[in-house]
Image (tube, rainbow, N blue to C red):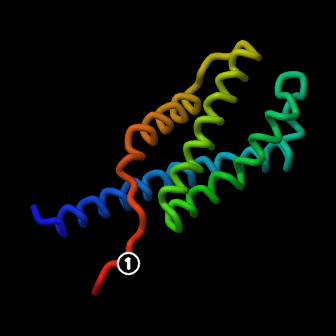
Amino acid sequence: MSGRVVGTVESTLSLGLRMAYAACLLVATITHVVMHVRFGVLLERLPSEIYPIFSRLYWSSLTLLDPLSALLLFLSPRWGVVAILGVIVSDVAHNTWLLYHIGGQPNFMYWCQVGFLVFVVATAKFIRPVRDVPC
């Protein structure tokens, strides 16, 4: 295969992965917004004896961090992946700690987060910088 074809395949794969990441982050953002509608801007209507303030603040911050990370994927793909890895690793770590803290069982949403983490870690190496394509 010529270098131009390989480059095109790599660029297409990179774009497809970035679109998949962004779609997952859009779903996460919608989930966070729904939580804010149900439980308040800082999730203050969640029981504080179960959900500590730092958990509620962290989840609230994801309402902005998720879409900003998705945007960064298209402005600077490699930094976008770094941002996403930071968000999803910290999210899974936090939610794992919280499940242990409250004695809860992992639910479907938790396993979706773990799956997304595995997906990003497994595919991040295929993300390429955006290049100007000659006409």
Describe the element under mark 1 as helix, strand or loop: loop
Front residue of 119 and 108: 119
Figure quadrant of the N terminus: bottom left
Front residue of 20 and 90: 90
* Residue type indicated by callout 1: Asp
The quadrant holding residue 109 is: top right
Residue at the image position 70 percent from the left and 21 percent from the top: 97
Q: Is residue 102 left or right of residue 130?
A: right
Residue, disc 1: 132
Q: Is 81 above or below relative to 44?
A: below
Total labels drawn:
1
Density class for disc 1 (Cα within 10 Å; few <14, some 14-19, many ≥20) is few
Residue 81: x percent and y percent? 51, 51
Residue 39: x percent and y percent? 83, 42
Figure quadrant of the C terminus: bottom left
- The residue lying furthest to the bottom in this view is 135
Residue 110: x percent and y percent? 58, 29
Residue 112: x percent and y percent? 51, 34
- The residue lying furthest to the top in this view is 103
Residue at the image position 60 percent from the left and 56 percent from the top: 69
Residue at the image position 31 percent from the left and 57 percent from the top: 13
- The residue lying furthest to the front in this view is 3
The quadrant holding residue 51 is: top right
Front residue of 49 and 101: 101
Q: Is 104 above or below relative to 43?
A: above
Front residue of 109 and 65: 65
